[in-house]
Amino acid sequence: MNKTEKALREIQAMDELAAMDSPIHRLAPLAKLLVTVAYIFVTVSFSKYDMTGLLIMILYPVAGYQFSLIPVYTCFYKLRIVLPLVCAVGIFNPFFDRGIVMTLGTISVSGGVISMLTLLMKGVFCLMASFLLVATTSIEEICHALRQFHVPRILTSLLLLTWRYVSLLLEQVSIMTQSYHLRAPGQKGIHVSAWGSFLGQLILRSMDRAAALYESMELRGFHGDFYYAGQKKMTAASWMYMVVWIGLFILMRAYNLPQILGSLFV
């Protein structure tokens, strides 16, 4: 299996995750979208030194993965390329912020180390929450929820078509690569002399397939709205899910719960 086929398999795996049946999958897409947006907003609003207050925000993604029957390992495996970039965001903070803010025994901890760890936690938590939304909601349902949230139709259509056309483009790359290797057996990769013609043929073939795909969507009644993705209405469970979690996010942000709980048990 080459890299293109692996990429196609990754996209198919995401669709398979979204097609699973669990309490989280059965909730309305709009409720899950609003909870995810609220979670990201609250998470990034923490101070760069408030690492203890931020720590409790891990409760939502951990609980979400448990109820959605998706292993946390799957999240980290799918995001293995993005996670190192997120971890490197605050890597230079210890060099610029050297003021001592706390001591652990004989070890002095600078503000740069605390802010670096806080940025790392914010990035990882937000990625976990975003992946939970994508893994439990199909792209059509997400676009439908965005339309309910009054996001412009052109943006939701671009999001949907980009997601679908990526798999189409990868499919064409796989077909053309296999054809090239059949004509040049034993050759590793594509020779530099064939790059121009290969890219030109890829663009033309992808445009033809994309036009045919969009015409078929229009024949089936697609004009920027997602009526076929609107079966999951805002039920009582969806409302409860949204209200409870957003209320918890507000409490987590307003009060430093780890310190409060720690003081209760001291």
Image (cartoon, grey):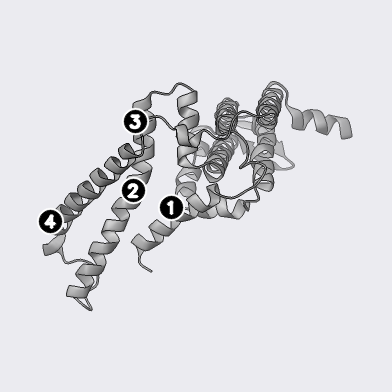
Query: What's the residue type where badge 4 is placed?
Result: Gly
Q: Position of residue 143 (x, y in %)?
A: 45, 33
Q: Which residue is mark 3?
A: 223
Q: Which residue is mark 1?
A: 11
Above-or-below relation of 70 to 40: below
For marks 4 and 2 on the same chain, the one whose residue lies earlier in the sequence: 2
In this rendered view, identify the residue nearer to me: 195 or 113: 195
The Cα–Cα distance between marks 4 and 2, rounded to whole angstroms, is: 21 Å
Q: Which one is closest to the eye, mark 4 or mark 2?
A: 2
Q: Are marks 2 and 1 in contact (CB under 8 Å)?
A: yes
Disc 1 to disc 3: CB gap under 8 Å: no
Q: Amino acid at mark 1?
A: Ile
Q: The residue tagged with tag 4: helix, strand or loop?
A: helix
Count of numbered labels shown in the rendering = 4
* Residue 266 visible in this rendered orientation of the protein: no
Give, as a three-letter code, the residue at label 2: Val
Q: Secondary structure at mark 1?
A: helix
Q: Which residue is under mark 2?
A: 166
